[in-house]
Image (cartoon, rainbow, N blue to C red):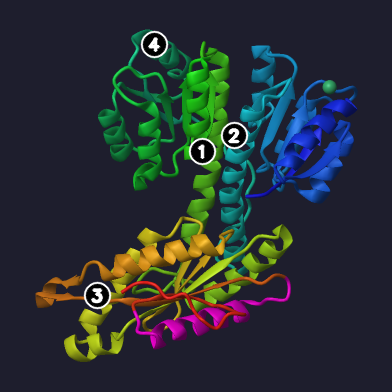
Amino acid sequence: MTARILVVDDVLPNVKLLEAKLSREYYDVLTAMNGPDALEIVEREVPDIVLLDVMMPGMDGFEVCEKIKSKANLMHIPVVMVTALSDTADRVRGLEAGADDFLTKPVNDIALFARVRSLIRLKIMMDELRLREATSSSFGVADSESTEVEVGGGRILVVEDREIYARNINQALVDNHTVTMVSGADDAVAAARAADVDLIIVSLSLQETDGLRLCSQLRSMEESRQIPILILVDDTPDQMERLVRGLDLGVNDYLIRPVDQNELMARCRTQLRRKKYEDRLRANYHLSMTLAVTDPLTGLYNRRYLESHLENLMQRAVQNDQPIGLLALDIDHFKAVNDTHGHAAGDEVLKEFATRVKRCVRFIDLAARTGGEEFVVVMPDSTREVCMAVAERLREAIAEAAVPVPDQDLEIPITVSIGVSESQGASDSPAGILRRGDDALYAAKNSGRNKVVFDEQDTPTASAQGA
Ligand SMILES: [Mg+2]
């Protein structure tokens, strides 16, 4: 997961230090030594993250941040304020200016890389949604205007079992938000399932519950997968280590105790703004999923949408030097299902197949029905290993349970053959990657079906797996 990071600081040794640390981890680093230069580079290069010094002569970091966050085409870029001051008022001012996080000088490596990784993950998701919106609007079915959204009251779920902490948090938030307080994991999971929640705050020092385990559970649950999580940690080495693991699990932000109420309010606002922005993109995106772009039987995309979106994805993959994987799927002996049990049963099989496909792929993956029993899954930013693992999981999910057809009191066992291909840089095309996926699919069919085969350009022996 590489990214382009802009480092802004008026002191050259500071720039050099951060540049060295980030380059060592293979990030692509851009630098600027004043506000106006930074803004010009942001406009021109559109980096993935900006690390921004607060104290600079002329235009300071707050002003630079405000300018970035006021532009519709740039506001999605995460900005991390780097400050020598651990002054809370400063942090609050930065968050008001739209900053996504803070690092204190001298910059601690764990905090730096945890933060960078977490923000890049978020950015990948946002870019994906923005790109989909652009694709939808090119069909003329969506309003693609993505300016700032209003952040009114949010619905915040707080998981804290110590009364004094709980009271402080409630006090900070209750005036502007709807706050639900729970003290244990079961209640938290139930509340996240039952209610529309915009933000979940989890204490990592719960007495009865492992807060980290709860975060992991919330991340894996369908209902709460997209909800931002903010964790509260104590300033101890043990908790710092758990904080890093939390960020790796997909926790969005954190606060270190003692919690300052202003900072808590400001950080909640930042997460809520992000959530509303994502919700809005998602809503536009659902709105645009008309019959023009979806297959009515399965709800998956149709071939027309796939081809258009694949074109955009491949252009972006070349720009970012990232791989794209493609799975070409075909249900084995599907014609026999129709012939033996009729088309109604065949439709049930197709619907259930699509449901299992959706369950196995990630939100950013694109699943389409491209023909009668033919499907394609496109996986952005995914290595061959990831694609093969997902394909194998999918193959198993199809084969492991027969499809029930209650109307006919039937259970129809099915299997799937899958061909996997990957993008090959600037000379590649949507037609090319689709064709290579199909080639691998035919290899899977010819070697006995119920198999996953990777398209090998150089080695003719395919890596067949499965029963
Ligand atoms: Mg400075």
Considering only order in the chain, which callout, 4 or 1, is on the residue closer to the N terminus? 4
Residue placed most toward the observer, 349 or 391 = 391
Circle 2 sits in a helix, a strand or a loop, which is it? helix
Task: Identify the amino acid type marked 3.
Answer: Glu
Placement of 149 over or under 103, stated as above or below: below
Task: Give the class, few, some or many, for how many residues have Cα within 10 Å of label 4's Cα (few <14, many ≥20).
Answer: few
Q: Name the residue under label 1.
A: 248
Q: How far apart are marks 1 and 3 (CA)?
A: 39 Å
The answer to whether the residues at label 2 and label 1 have Cβ atoms under 8 Å apart is yes
Q: Mark 2 points at which residue?
A: 114
- Disc sitting over residue 167 in the figure: 4
Q: Is label 3 within 8 A of ligand 1 (CB to nearest ligand atom)? A: no
Q: Is residue 139 visible?
A: no
Residue 416, image x and y in percent? 34, 76
Quick check: is the Cβ at mark 4 less than 8 Å away from ligand 1? Answer: no
Cα–Cα gap, marks 2 and 1: 7 Å
Disc 1 on helix, strand or loop? helix
First of labels 4, 3 by sequence position: 4
